[in-house]
Image (cartoon, grey):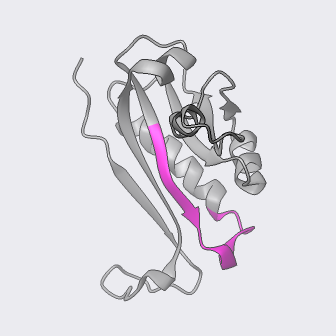
Amino acid sequence: MQLSPSLVCMVQRGENAAASDEQCECINHVAGVGTVQMIELNGKMAAALRAQPGTPFALVANFAVQPTLRGRGIGRTLLRACEQTVRERFVPLPRSMLLLVYRDNPVAIQLYKSHGFVECSEWIDPAWLEDAEKGRLGNSKRLLFVKDLN
């Protein structure tokens, strides 16, 4: 199976942003950003998702909205753009979209749930597992959310 080139970065500018890339002088004009890339899962994450090793998935990462601009629909717009990009440009179409979110970010978790993502309760954060093996216990910091694209 041949995977398409697949790293896409989307940027949403704020209402007062410059009209063109040439005029946009600094990062302060960026309202939000997100990247999406094709990955092939193996190991524990593939097992948690009940996927065969090598199954293509779309990973949404580096997803953020400027704190002063939150609550204006920018995150929702970016998330829709990520999904649209995956559906239109990724060949073959991945089975699902994945994203990781910190457990202590209820606003982001609600955004992802409202967009059709569900928590994969079978996934164990490898960073947490490594800490646990060293005797540092506590809750996992990150959660894995999945949205089926079929």
Q: Quadrant of residue 94?
A: top left
Judged from this view, the residue extending furthest toward the front is 135
At x 56%, y 62%, the residue is: 64
Is residue 49 at all visible to an observer of this figure? no
Residue 146 located left or right of residue 40 = right
The quadrant of the rendering that contains the N terminus is top left
At x 59%, y 81%, the residue is: 15
Q: Quadrant of residue 132?
A: top right
Q: How many marks?
A: 0
Start-end of magenta stretch: 59-74
The quadrant of the rendering that contains the C terminus is top right
Q: Position of residue 5 (x, y in %)?
A: 24, 40
Is residue 118 at all visible to an observer of this figure? yes
Task: State whether residue 22 is above or below residue 61.
Answer: below
Task: State whether residue 38 is above or below residue 32.
Answer: above
Task: State whether residue 75 is above or below residue 97.
Answer: below
At x 56%, y 18%, the residue is: 48
At x 60%, y 73%, the residue is: 66
Residue 66 located left or right of residue 87 = right
Q: Position of residue 136 (x, y in %)?
A: 63, 42
Q: Position of residue 102 (x, y in %)?
A: 65, 49
- Is residue 98 shown in magenta? no
Residue 51 located left or right of residue 141 = left
Q: Position of residue 47 (x, y in %)?
A: 51, 15
